[in-house]
């Protein structure tokens, strides 16, 4: 994967939008005004950054707790490596799985290879979802466990910071 060198405007655009778009009728126009450029320039740079993979996606992130999904668990599954990718695709396609991925095992303490996060309005909902995954995995599942969330943690990805500009030093 090759690195992308951002222009100063692109860097400022990433910094301005990395915490979300402004909740106004014309968010890109407001961003442009803040950055001192045109809305067309903002849209062109965002399109380019999406195309180059610098920006992965633009979308809203719902607060699932406010929607009533107060129970969630990371499920972990010990499945044969030969089937792990195909099974992960099937599990990840389930409507109640928010994310699903493969991780290395850490034997002998951690045999799990497949991880899937599930969300429900009740613990019973989550347990039914786990049972559905277990049924889908069938004989490919050697063992499994669930790790229920006990705390809400603020989750954010890496954030760019504005460049450090040293203040001029007064000479006496």
Image (cartoon, rainbow, N blue to C red):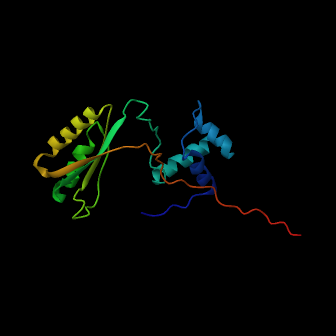
x then y, percent, for residue 144:
20, 50
Q: Does residue 20 lie above or below 55 as drawn? A: above
In this orientation, which residue lies closer to the viewer: 57 or 66?
66
User: Most extreme residue toward the right, as rendered?
Assistant: 172
State the image quarter where residue 102 is shown: bottom left
User: Most extreme residue toward the left, as rendered?
Assistant: 139
State the image quarter where residue 94 is shown: top left
**Residue placed at 27% from the left, 44% from the top?**
92
User: Most extreme residue toward the front, as rendered?
Assistant: 150
| Image quarter (top left, top right, bottom left or bottom right) of the C terminus | bottom right
Task: Judge left or right: residue 96 versus residue 136.
Answer: right
| Image quarter (top left, top right, bottom left or bottom right) of the N terminus | bottom left
x then y, percent, for residue 111:
21, 59
**How many numbered marks are there?**
0
**Residue placed at 44% from the left, 35% from the top?**
63
Task: Judge left or right: residue 55 versus residue 10.
Answer: left
State the image quarter where residue 99 is shown: top left
**Residue placed at 56% from the left, 45% from the top?**
17
**Residue placed at 22% from the left, 44% from the top?**
90
x then y, percent, for residue 73:
31, 43
In this orientation, which residue lies closer to the viewer: 156 or 32?
156
In this orientation, which residue lies closer to the viewer: 62 or 152?
152
């Amino acid at each position: 994967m090759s690195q992308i060198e951002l222009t100063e405007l692109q860097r400022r655009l990433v910094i301005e939008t990395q915490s979300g778009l402004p909740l106004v009728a014309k968010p890109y126009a407001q961003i442009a005004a803040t950055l001192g450029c045109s809305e067309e320039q903002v849209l062109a740079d965002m399109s380019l950054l999406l195309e180059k993979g610098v920006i992965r996606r633009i979308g809203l992130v719902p607060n699932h707790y406010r929607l009533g999904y107060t129970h969630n668990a990371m499920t972990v599954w010990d499945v044969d490596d030969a089937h792990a990718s195909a099974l992960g695709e099937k599990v990840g396609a389930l409507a109640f799985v928010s994310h699903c991925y493969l991780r290395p095992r850490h034997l002998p303490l951690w045999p799990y290879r497949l991880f899937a996060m599930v969300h429900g309005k009740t613990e019973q909902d989550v347990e039914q979802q786990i049972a559905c995954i277990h049924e889908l995995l069938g004989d490919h599942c050697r063992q499994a466990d669930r790790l229920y969330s006990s705390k809400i943690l603020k989750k954010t990805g890496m954030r760019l910071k504005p460049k450090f500009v040293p203040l001029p030093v007064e000479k006496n």
